[in-house]
Image (tube, rainbow, N blue to C red):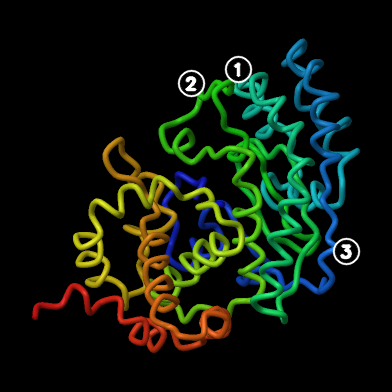
Amino acid sequence: MMSFFTNPLTWQRWIPLALGISSVGGLTTCAGIHQVEEVKFITTDLDNFWATYPAVLQDTAQAASLLQQHYFTAGSPGLQEYYQNRYQSKPQPFAQRITQHPRFYASARHAMQTIAAQKPQVLAAFRRLQALYPPVRFNHIYFLVGGFRGSTAQRQGLLIGVEYLVDGPDVDTSELTLVERRRCSPVAAIPAMVTHEMIHNTQQPADGTLLSYAIREGMGDFVAELVTGIPGTNTRLHEYGQAHEQELWRAFQQEMNGKDARNWLANSEQETTKKPCDLGYYVGYKICQAYYNKATDKKQAVADMLTTKDFQAFFRQSGYARQWQAP
């Protein structure tokens, strides 16, 4: 996933909101599901939304009331929690977002209806993750229309706003902002995105520095790619990063021990046609990749990542910075 927020955030607030993922009590919810087959893949809220959507378009003045009655009130426990968390249980802001993007929603309907078919790929990724790191635990997964408010990990499980996971040649993104368009990924990215979030259940808490949060997020991307074989939702970061890696490292190095992430994470206001935001994900990914590539025991390397509490030591042991040092 992924940030879907345009308002400036303090460093303390960005942590759970990066790429739209929030948490309970400052840390991503810890799951208690050990058996992969017990993970529920819940898409009933998508069905309820599409049963309501035609009436919303026909009478936009009643959109909030219709959505309240037929979408939120009839929704899953996950949607109920999302509604309270993202909208303070007020239907008007959600209705406004829906009615402001009619071309997008109409064109994305088919893709949303194919999300349930991703369950075998998601569970296969979870099995591979568990094979790499047996102590991992999982959440139930709720897929819902979130009005471009991203996704969140809460007590009910992972609450996935699907707007950013339904891109394709037939989806009209002309109503979206630049950063919204560039964050859109196809349905096929769901296994990597959801695996990234499950990894957050297992990681150790960050230490408050930019370095620790970048490593945590980059670790989510790296391990998810390891078990799914696909790059997930941050492809554009890698395209830019590969062309500017040394430049990015030098800039990141100047800030990595501080507690201000405004230039690296949850900085959607810095997205331009030439440079993406959230490049801390890329730097963190490269640090984790360096650690993994250096390790003889690859399974142990994954365990080291997921259990590290000393992010400075992990960074040093990765050897990532050495390639940029003068001979």
Q: Residues within 10 Å of mark 3 (few under 14, many from 20)?
A: few
Residue type at tag 2? Ser
Position of residue 279 measured from the top left corner of the image (x, y, whole percent): 36, 56
Element marked by disc 1: helix
Q: Residues within 10 Å of mark 2 (few under 14, many from 20)?
A: few
Residue that label 1 marks: 103
Element marked by disc 3: helix
Q: CA distance from mark 1 to mark 3?
A: 37 Å
Position of residue 297 measured from the top left corner of the image (x, y, whole percent): 51, 85
Are the two marked residues, 1 and 3, in contact with CB atoms closer than 8 angstroms?
Answer: no
Tell me what residue is drawn at x 73 percent, y 61 percent: 154
Q: Nearer the viewer, mark 2 or mark 3?
A: 3
Q: Is residue 14 left or right of residue 277?
A: right
Are the two marked residues, 1 and 2, in contact with CB atoms closer than 8 angstroms?
Answer: yes
Question: Which label number is shown at residue 174?
Answer: 2
Q: Is residue 214 left or right of residue 59?
A: left
Residue type at tag 1? Arg
Residue type at tag 3? Glu
Q: Which residue is the extreme one toward the right?
A: 74
Which is nearer the N-term, disc 2 or disc 3? 3
Residue that label 3 marks: 38
Position of residue 118 measured from the top left corner of the image (x, y, whole percent): 73, 45
Q: Which residue is the extreme one toward the left?
A: 327
**Rendered view: 139 above or below 100:** below
Position of residue 89 measured from the top left corner of the image (x, y, whole percent): 76, 44
Q: Quadrant of residue 319?
A: bottom left
**Rendered view: 243 above or below 217:** above
